Image (cartoon, grey):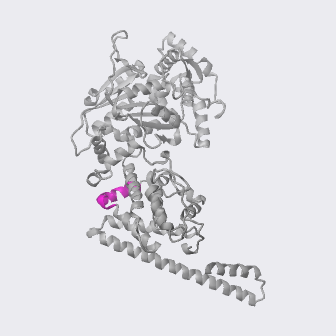
Amino acid sequence: MASRSPALRRALQTASRTQSCRSFTSTSATLTQPADYPTRHQPPTRDPSRPTHFGFETVTESEKQQRVASVFTSVAESYDRMNDLMSFGWHRVWKDHFVRTLNPGFSPLSSSPSGPQHILDIAGGTGDIAFRMLHQAHVLNHNPDVRVTVSDINPSMLAVGKQRSQELPATQQAALSWLEANAEDLNSVRPLHSDPNGPTSSIPDASVDLYTVAFGIRNFSNIPAALREAHRVLKPGGIFACLEFSKADNYPLFNAVYKRWSFSAIPMIGQLVAGDRDSYQYLVESIERFPSQEDFRDMIVDAGFVVGGRGYENLTGGVAAIHRGMKPRN
Amino acid sequence: MSPTTLPASLTRTSLRRLAHSRPTTCLLRTAAHRSITTSTTTPTRPSPTLQQPLRRATRQHQTRPLHYPAHPSSPSDAPFSPPELALLRAAYAHVPQHGFSAESLALGARDIGLLDISTNLLPNGDFDLIRYHLFTQREALVEKSRGLQGSVRDRVFELTWLRLLGNREVVGRWQEALAIMAQPSYVPASLSALHELVDDIWYLAGDVSVDPSWYTKRASLSAIYVSAELFMTDDRSAGFEETKAFLRRRFDEVGELSSVLGAVREWVSFSGSSAINVLRSKGVPTENISSLSEKREVDGLG
């Protein structure tokens, strides 16, 4: 952290000058303003100058990308420690549950194997989800024919994940690949640490069995575009699965305590542990701006997925939620 | 409340509506129950005679098997979406061999050209497969209830037996299924499925009473059904004859129980009026109490 470049420091300061003095005020009026996502039937387009939001600020899409990048560059190394402190370690329970219910690598014993399974873990920089997927598939389901592509827009996060992957068994390391990609455009991706000006490749249509994004999608500038890309790269029958912070509005008392915790304690912990209040202020604001369970479910359906039941599963009273959708066969 | 005491204007449907206008009943209802079929609502034709209500209700099932007029079905009420149904239907074919398990689900997914991972479409996996079984068997009862003869009690027995036979194909796997249903997170859904089943059985048997026995009837039938279902998982007799005999004994016991309850009530009422007479003989003013007591006796006669 100490070696943060002056340019980056400046970027961060401008990114969050207005946020740093903002604090928790009320849970209803100011915090539940509708997010300015494109409305449901408006075709999502990519336009770097289109306004989107960064925490409670309104910025252009390209600016949000830069700012999110700087936030995660600055928190990459302390990311896991911070998550533990903020959620009392509970994020591990959520992630375990997420991976266990998806059960990657499961194959019927009474039938022949159905060929390799390809998992694309978007915004999975530090490898949290990818390593669990490999454990579930290779160790618990005894299916070595599962590979995981970890994709992140941010090379710093990927570098942390790649470093951590050195401790995995060799077979699991061999099943991993690391990709620098913008989830809204999976047609131009490049391997980690390759030449930034070199040629880019593309994730082909219908090539992925399972697309996961855990605690990442709320940072996207254009969520509908990302959902359309997910739909494109998934095979028919493939699953889109998203683990994300959500709304605990069903339990007002619990929600009030949770809001107070997130708006007052989390930025402070960020300051004390990571020496970076602003990034964590952004974190809680972005959680607040993310659509509710039902709205996000509708966005998934609009992108062409089918959902089962009500389309989502609440975790810890709705603090986090798992959304799953399947790409239908035709 | 026997059908012969009812005025002609009270059709079976209106009685049903009355029965279900009570808040408790509505609360207990779930979307799955309301959508037992998906046809559209047709207005009920008033019946000219009283002997016809049951037959008319049965006929109504042919066009609109949904028997919950107060809550017409809508597509959003359906317990499973079409893609879920397709997957469950394919997976169900594997249940006799592989149980209510992820294995059956994955095999079913392959059968309809999906991937192993596609079973994640279902929110609860194996429990959804069990719910599918419960739902389809309950739905099938509507068809089976046609042409049943005898008293309400006989028809309830027959319908319970027919429902038990619905488990025949999967009986070797049913203990596993009961274990899954008993998992804490699934208990509320399992209990409401049981309630929907016994509620349907009483309704399809032609019981429309709205007195407090509404509760005792459903409670006792639930207890009987659950024990008989458990008995059946261990029954090796031909055609599950032993289960049928077991079921018959349980029904007889309930008959005895209700006559015991009747005797207790008689005893309480006799003792109560005796006590009042004793008080009266001591010169205690008992007008209010005795008027209540007399009223109760009149009610009891009715």
Q: In which quarter of the image is residue A255?
A: top right
- In percent of width and height, residue A39 lies at 54, 27
Q: Name the residue rendered at 38%, 52% in the picture.
A: B132
x 32%, y 36%: residue: A135
- Relative depth, front residue between A279 and A111: A111
Q: Farthest residue in the bottom direction? A: B281
Locate residue A80 relative to residue A170 in the image: left or right. Answer: right
The structure residue drawn at horizontal position 66% and vertical position 78%, both measured from the top left corner, is: B296
For this view, does B296 lie left or right of residue A99? right
Residue B88 vertical position relative to residue A217 in the rendered view, above or below: below
Give the image quarter of residue A306.
Answer: top left
Count of picture labels: 0
Check if residue B193 falls in the magenta segment.
Answer: no
Farthest front residue? Answer: B48
Q: Position of residue B301 (x, y in %)?
A: 62, 81
Horizontal and vertical percent position of residue B208:
53, 67
Viewer-proximal residue among A268 and A140: A140
- The correct choice, above or below, for B91 with respect to A145 in the image is below
Magenta-colored span: B167-182
